[in-house]
Amino acid sequence: MNLLFTHLLDTSALIAHYREESGWEMVDALLSDEANGVRISSVTWLEFRNRLTELTPDADERSRAMQIYRTLLG
């Protein structure tokens, strides 16, 4: 596991990645490169979860998305 902190993502970056909106490729590249130490704050994690609730009415889909981002971000 890479302990070096190189990038801090905000909620809009996570939402863009999740929804494949403008800029999502850059976020994907950051997350895919193991040399990067991508992090989010606890506030961002909470905001992301709340936005997913608004954007994704299906509880199973929200759970799947949260698990994916837990895996990606540790």
Image: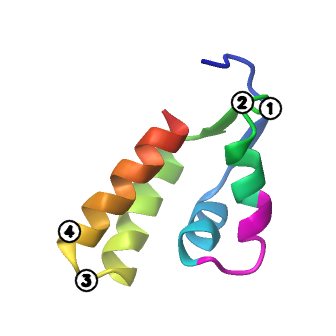
* Mark 4 secondary-structure assignment: helix
Closer to the chain start, of discs 4 and 1, is: 1
Q: Which residue is disc 1 drawn over?
A: 6
Separation of disc 4 and disc 2 at Cα?
29 Å
State yes or no: discs 1 and 2 in contact (Cβ < 8 Å): yes
Amino acid on which disc 3 is placed: Pro
Q: Which residue is disc 3 drawn over?
A: 57
How packed is label 4: few (under 14 Cα within 10 Å), some, or many (20 or more)?
Answer: few
**Residue 62 in picture, x, y percent from top left:** 30, 67
Applied colour scheme: rainbow
Residue 47 falls left or right of residue 8: left
**Residue 32 in picture, x, y percent from top left:** 69, 45
Amino acid on which disc 1 is placed: Thr
Residue 71 falls left or right of residue 6: left
Q: Is residue 25 magenta?
A: yes
The mark closer to the camera, 3 or 4, is: 4
* Mark 1 secondary-structure assignment: loop
Nearest the viewer among 28 and 56 is: 28
The magenta region covers 20-26
Residue drawn at (78%, 71%) of the image: 23
* Occupied quadrant, residue 34: top right
Q: Which residue is disc 2 drawn over?
A: 37
Q: Which residue is disc 4 drawn over?
A: 60
The mark closer to the camera, 4 or 1, is: 4
**Residue 5 in picture, x, y percent from top left:** 74, 26
**Residue 52 in picture, x, y percent from top left:** 38, 71
Separation of disc 2 and disc 3 at Cα?
31 Å
Closer to the chain start, of discs 1 and 2, is: 1
Separation of disc 1 and disc 2 at Cα?
5 Å
State yes or no: discs 4 and 2 in contact (Cβ < 8 Å): no
Amino acid on which disc 4 is placed: Asp
Residue drawn at (56%, 41%) of the image: 41
